[in-house]
Amino acid sequence: MTVNQTEMHPTRWGDPARARALPDEARGLVEMVFGVDDRPAVEHPALAPSALTPELVAGLEEIVGVGHVLTDDETRRLRTRGKSTPDLLRARVGDLADAPDAVVRPADHDEVAAVLAFAVEHRLAVVPFGGGTSVTGGLVARREGFAGVLSLDLVWMKRLLSVDHVSMTATLEPGLRGPEAEALLAAEGMTIGHFPQSFEYASLGGFAATRSSGQSSAGFGRFDALVVGMTVATPRGRIDLGTAPANAAGPDLRQLFLGSEGTLGVITSLTVRVRPVPAVQVYECWRWSSFADGATAMRTLAQSGLLPTVLRLSDESESAINLADPAAIGGEAATGCLMVTGFEGEPAAVEAKRAAVTTVFEGLGGTYAGTAAGEKWAHGRYDAPYLRDSLLDAGVLVETLETATFWSNLDRVYTGVKAALEAALGQPSLVLCHISHVYETGASLYYTIAAKETDDPVGQWRAAKAAASDAMLAAGATITHHHAVGTDHLPWFEREIGPVGVSILRAVKADLDPTGVLNPGVLIP
């Protein structure tokens, strides 16, 4: 099998060819608000030598084949950490201390299982790697107590195994990136419809292991809701889950592995719900006089069964700087709050839902803003991380965090977290927010911050993140809606699930992974 994919730069997000300097207008805004302090990144950070002995490398090669166990510095750099701002800040100054000792590329379930058995025998930590888009420290394994760390790179596991056109399901391997999976399914006239901001680089296995939520979740649902079956390799053996669309055969064991972040097993195949490729896609915008009014409109749609495919609302600050259209930052400021709606499907169904939504929105005082802004959002929906890199180059700290709560608690969480971030960051700083995902009972709040970097930007962000996380739990919200736990959220995750929840997770971990080789230090308190 030939693998042809663009690798993300070790100190930046995404395709290196798409890296851009700040546009002049945006740079002028940065200069005015923060001052520009150009901070170029180290291009080829040095690594410590691999800790694996030749004998261990040879043993792994017996399992996956010669050429599929890589210990060269360049490959190890590309499999170090994820793409959070702290990850990049450390890499940009030459710190890749968490680099794996080897990158191991299995071709199928049996090879994954054999690598896990080898790791148990030789005390090697194993970090499952899909697309490398983690933003919460999910790819940073604890090294203490292990002879080395392996990046279990699923890049060879990229097959569409089957499509059931009658049941509307498809079975795929976990190493497929979002665009690769969609291309294979499009040839069958199908789509998963899962499009998070990380879509271009994240993998199906990663979507499942972190409970990803895409920008089309209002219409298609979260990724975990799309999974109907899976196969998992664990140190204790193989488990196949998902024999029916629903059952009452005890607790749903799929839920143990959805969101397990590679700590309980390695997902080696997924069966997911699919639907026909939409014939029509329409994206348009509305404006609301306040964030509260826009949120009320979202709740009304959710509780009336009228949700479009895409629905997101920026607060006044985010709307004012056009964050929904990163290319326009620094341009003319808008007023009120911008909402993006997207409709996908057959023409008649799309027009009927658009008409119904229009009636609701007009009745609630919304102002139609046309399709131009909506199409701009759709065109640039994956570009924000590139803007983050450009701002880091200019000495501006930029990062995101998210949470979720019930509708009745939304304003309390929104104001509490925003105030905590503003107090921790000080001035000059910006704290922006949008509602990214909606449900009948509540919604997710997604914050973006920008501040002038201090001499310790990682510590600067850690302090702000801690303040925001404390505010989330104090207000009764979750520590994460879709970014997962990783290592960054562990202290607050433990508080959220309580001592009994921690005991349950530890017991499952001890049974499935008794030697603790799977992603040690991640998720499990």
Image: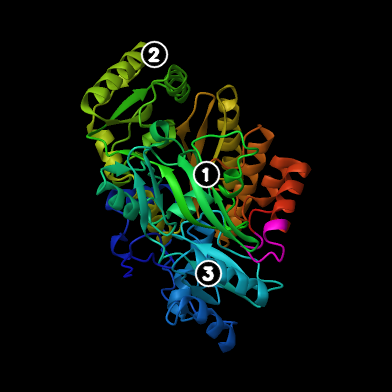
Find the residue positioned furthest to the top: 363
**Comparing marks 1 and 3, which lies closer to the viewer?**
1
| Kind of residue indicated by mark 2 | Leu
Q: Is residue 520 magenta?
A: yes
Mark 2 / mark 1, whichever is N-terminal: 1
Q: Is residue 147 magenta?
A: no
| Kind of residue indicated by mark 1 | Gly
In the displayed structure, would residue 191 be above or below residue 462?
A: above
Magenta stretch, residue numbers: 511-521
Q: Secondary structure at mark 1?
A: loop
Q: Which residue is mark 2?
A: 364
**Comparing marks 2 and 1, which lies closer to the viewer?**
1
Q: Position of residue 441 (x, y in %)?
A: 54, 24
Q: Position of residue 182 (x, y in %)?
A: 32, 49
**C-alpha distance separating marks 2 and 1:** 43 Å
Q: Which residue is mark 3?
A: 151
- Which residue is pictured at 58% across the width and 50% down the height? 257
Task: Say which of 464 and 137 sits in front.
Answer: 137
The majority secondary structure of the magenta stretch comes to loop
Q: Which residue is mark 1?
A: 242
Mark 1 / mark 3, whichever is N-terminal: 3
**C-alpha distance separating marks 1 and 3:** 28 Å
